[in-house]
Amino acid sequence: MSHSRAKREVMAKSGKNWIQGAVNPEHKGALHKSLGVPEGQRIPEKKLKKAEHSQNALTRKRANLAETLKGFGRK
């Protein structure tokens, strides 16, 4: 079974709580670090858009996830 297939199955099982499988707590703040934005500050929209087109695939994925999660709002 491939990694992505296993991930999809885990996400499908979790249903409503798919985000727990998408966010790894060991890499908390990794996008901030790679973009040079201090933790606790918001990533500027311009930097986030630029990161979505990064040559680095991992940075691109993290930026896309951040863009997706941005739409969920805050409590």
Image: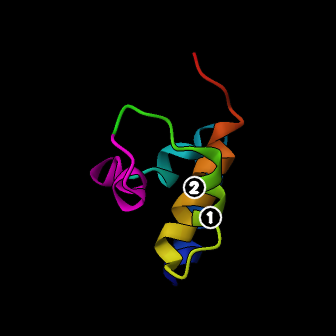
Kind of residue sitting beneath label 1: Lys
Quick check: 30 left or right of 58?
Answer: left
Q: Position of residue 23 (x, y in %)?
A: 46, 50
Instruction: For mark 2, give the secondary structure.
Output: helix
- Residue that appears at 56% across and 45% down: 19
- Residue that appears at 42% across and 58% down: 35
| Label 2, residues with CA under 10 Å away: few <14, some 14-19, many ≥20 | few
Q: Is residue 72 above or below residue 44?
A: above
- Residue that appears at 57% across and 55% down: 47
Q: Position of residue 57 (x, y in %)?
A: 52, 78
Label 1, label 2: how far apart the Cα atoms are:
5 Å
Range shown magenta: 25-38
Instruction: Check if residue 3 falls in the magenta segment.
Output: no
Q: Position of residue 55 (x, y in %)?
A: 54, 82
Q: Is residue 74 above or below residue 10?
A: above
- The one nearer the camera, 23 or 60, is 60
For disc 2, the marked residue is 47
Q: Are marks 1 and 2 in contact (CB under 8 Å)?
A: yes
Asked which quadrant contains residue 15, the reply is top right
Asked which quadrant contains residue 10, the reply is bottom right
Instruction: For mark 1, give the secondary structure.
Output: helix
Instruction: Check if residue 36 falls in the magenta segment.
Output: yes
The residue furthest top is: 75
Q: Quadrant of the C terminus?
A: top right
For disc 1, the marked residue is 50
Quick check: 35 left or right of 39?
Answer: right
Q: Position of residue 41 (x, y in %)?
A: 42, 33
